């Protein structure tokens, strides 16, 4: 029933994408609005499964080079009802003078877990972007350094992405491929939220993780895009007695509206 409700909500957004042009013209050109409703067969974060069957809405507002957004993760089954996550983020992305291929992305993320006694983490990030190539359009490399000020995680994550547009006059199609690796250094003992309440002892660990995805996007309206993807993420060099590894192959579907 919950999956059916989500499908109906996606269909409703398709209808809502046909907003009158007069309403959209009310917003100045430097402003942007991006809304998404999505479904993930499995929510994976830095190599580890958090929950199955997750409804994942997204909202982002931008002004020039700055952006502000929210990502939500809501399990649709009772088995993972103890997991719910909100990510509030803000940042700025800008180019480097006289360096057309390089960009900088700076920002912060607040992670909130309502069912974990109001647990909240504050993370800061800085990213170097390298792309905008004349020879290979759609190719971009990135390298991010992140630090969680609460649990003292430091993460280095380089990645690569490639996207290609098929200019089909009927339904424009975009394909996108992503790959990344991550190195997480843990300097403070923390609790694993999956531990039984009576056995929540602190532990410390550092590990590596990696992942990749293949996605396809169909532009069904000037302001609406329907996407679907296959993803895989995994973690290595981790204490599997505390956090068993899963076969983190999963799929996603989403509807995005951008103005």
Image: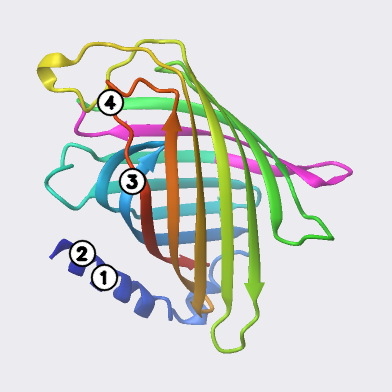
Up-down: is 69 above or below 197?
below
Question: Residue lying furthest right in this view?
Answer: 98
Residue matched to label 3: 43
Residue matched to label 1: 7
Q: Residue 91 carries which label?
A: none
Labelled pair 4, 2 in contact (Cβ < 8 Å): no
Q: State which tag comes first along the sequence, 3 or 1.
A: 1
Nearer mark to the viewer, of 1 and 4: 1
Q: State which tag comes first along the sequence, 2 or 3.
A: 2
Q: Is residue 90 visible?
A: yes
Q: Residue 3 carries which label?
A: 2
Q: State which tag comes first along the sequence, 3 or 4.
A: 3
In the picture, the quarter occupied by the N terminus is: bottom left
Labelled pair 2, 1 in contact (Cβ < 8 Å): yes
Numbered range of the magenta stretch: 91-116
Front one among 237 and 116: 237
Horizontal side of 80 relative to 169 (left or right) equals left
Pointer 2: residues within 10 angstroms few (<14), some, or many (20+)?
some
State how far apart marks 2 and 1 are (Cα): 6 Å
Horizontal side of 34 relative to 249 (left or right) equals right
SS under mark 1: helix
Q: Please provide percent x and percent y for residue 134.
A: 84, 60
Residue at the image position 53 percent from the left and 70 percent from the top: 26
Residue matched to label 4: 119
Q: Is residue 11 magenta?
A: no
Q: Please provide percent x and percent y for residue 215.
A: 50, 62
SS under mark 3: strand
The image quadrant of residue 203 is: top left
Q: Please provide percent x and percent y for residue 7.
A: 26, 70
State how far apart marks 3 and 4 are (Cα): 19 Å
């Amino acid at each position: 029933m919950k999956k059916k409700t989500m499908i109906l909500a996606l269909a409703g957004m398709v209808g809502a994408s046909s907003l009158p042009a007069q309403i959209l013209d009310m917003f100045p050109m430097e402003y942007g609005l991006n809304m998404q409703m999505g479904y993930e067969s499995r929510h994976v974060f830095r190599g580890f499964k958090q929950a199955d069957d997750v409804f994942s809405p997204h909202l982002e507002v931008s002004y020039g080079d700055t952006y502000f957004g929210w990502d939500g993760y809501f399990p649709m089954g009772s088995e993972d009802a103890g997991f719910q996550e909100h990510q509030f983020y803000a940042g700025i992305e800008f180019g480097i003078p006289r360096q057309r291929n390089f960009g900088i992305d700076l920002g912060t993320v607040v992670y909130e877990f309502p069912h974990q006694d109001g647990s909240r983490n504050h993370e800061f990030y800085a990213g170097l972007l390298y792309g905008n190539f004349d020879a290979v359009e759609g190719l971009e490399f990135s390298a991010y350094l992140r630090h969680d000020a609460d649990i003292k995680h430091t993460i280095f994550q380089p990645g690569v992405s490639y996207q290609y547009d098929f200019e089909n006059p009927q339904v424009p199609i975009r394909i996108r491929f992503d790959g990344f690796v991550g190195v997480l250094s843990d300097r403070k003992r923390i609790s694993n939220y999956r531990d039984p309440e009576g056995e929540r002892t602190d532990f410390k660990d550092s590990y590596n993780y990696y992942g990749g995805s293949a996605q396809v996007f169909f532009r069904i309206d000037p302001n609406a895009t329907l996407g679907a993807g296959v993803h895989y993420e995994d973690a290595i060099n981790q204490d599997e007695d505390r956090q068993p590894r899963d076969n983190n192959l999963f799929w996603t579907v989403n509807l995005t509206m951008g103005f």
